[in-house]
Amino acid sequence: MFFDNPADIVQVATIADLDLFPRWIFNSIDSSRAHSIDEVTKWHARFMSLAWSFFFPVAIIAARYYKVMPRQNFPQEIDNQWWWIMHRVCVGLGTVAVLIGFSLIYYFSSGDVTANELHRYLGWSALVLLMVQIAGGLLRGTRGGPKMRHHQGALRGDHYDMTSRRIVFERVHKSVGYLAIAVAWTATVAGLWHVNAPIWIWLLTTGWWACMCIFAVYLQKQHRAIDTYQAIWGTNPELVGNKLPIIGIGIHRIKHQDKR
């Protein structure tokens, strides 16, 4: 009914018999060892990967490259809140995922598969760095600025005035954030190697990381890493924060244009 030529039937059958993926990607990365992982450890890995390979990197990309949105009429329009909301949401969800993943492996693991020393130390280090980030965020000081006048009665604020407290926060927060991601990704590699994960997991994980890094490089070359102070309060050179050196590597400050 659908095929006029019997050869077409043979061709379709041959295509159907082909594997969609090469068989080798389902093999373990180390052929000399078996892939061994219990169910609790498997879910631990999933939650940790969700946090450190998705939520936290997205939080960093949003905070670094989307303080000014692509179609935002900057600097006439300032203080876009999208990046701040996205950063907090992703950090919050990532933290929840980390705590679930940690609880699974710490309280419910059967012990059938134990982490190697490298993965354990790196995992604990990433957790400590995450706690430092959260504590630093809570201790970052007041905001200040025109929009906060109804709260404080004045413009004064740690961020608006770029006090020593705020400068220390920004330097530490940015540095620790990137370090935490690097440590967590190294812990991921150590964990995948320890359980002798299949090749497809390695390809998926490294492919995703590569895509995010390439996207970040693209945004960096587009000069989207705009100075936080300028993004919130504008480019006026008389503002306190615009008189200070830029905090962070690769941060772009836009030249003020006086249209009077």
Image: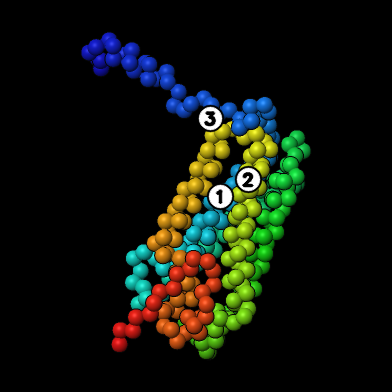
| Residue with the most extreme right position | 111
Mark earlier in primary sequence (3, 2): 3
Residue 173 numbered tag: none
Q: Are marks 1 and 2 in contact (CB under 8 Å)?
A: yes
Q: How crowded is mark 2: few (under 14 residues within 10 Å), some or many (20 or more)?
A: many
In this view of the protein, can residue 144 be seen by the observer? no
The residues bearing labels 1 and 2 have C-alpha atoms spaced at a distance of: 9 Å
Q: Mark 3 points at which residue?
A: 25
Closer to us: 214 or 85: 214
Tell me the SS state at disc 1. helix
- Residue drawn at x 51%, y 74% is 246
Q: In this view, does 111 lie to the left or right of 57?
A: right
Tell me the SS state at disc 2. helix
| Residue with the most extreme left position | 4
Residue type at mark 3 is Ile
Residue type at mark 1 is Ser
Q: Mark 1 points at which residue?
A: 53
Q: Mark 2 points at which residue?
A: 188
Mark earlier in primary sequence (1, 2): 1
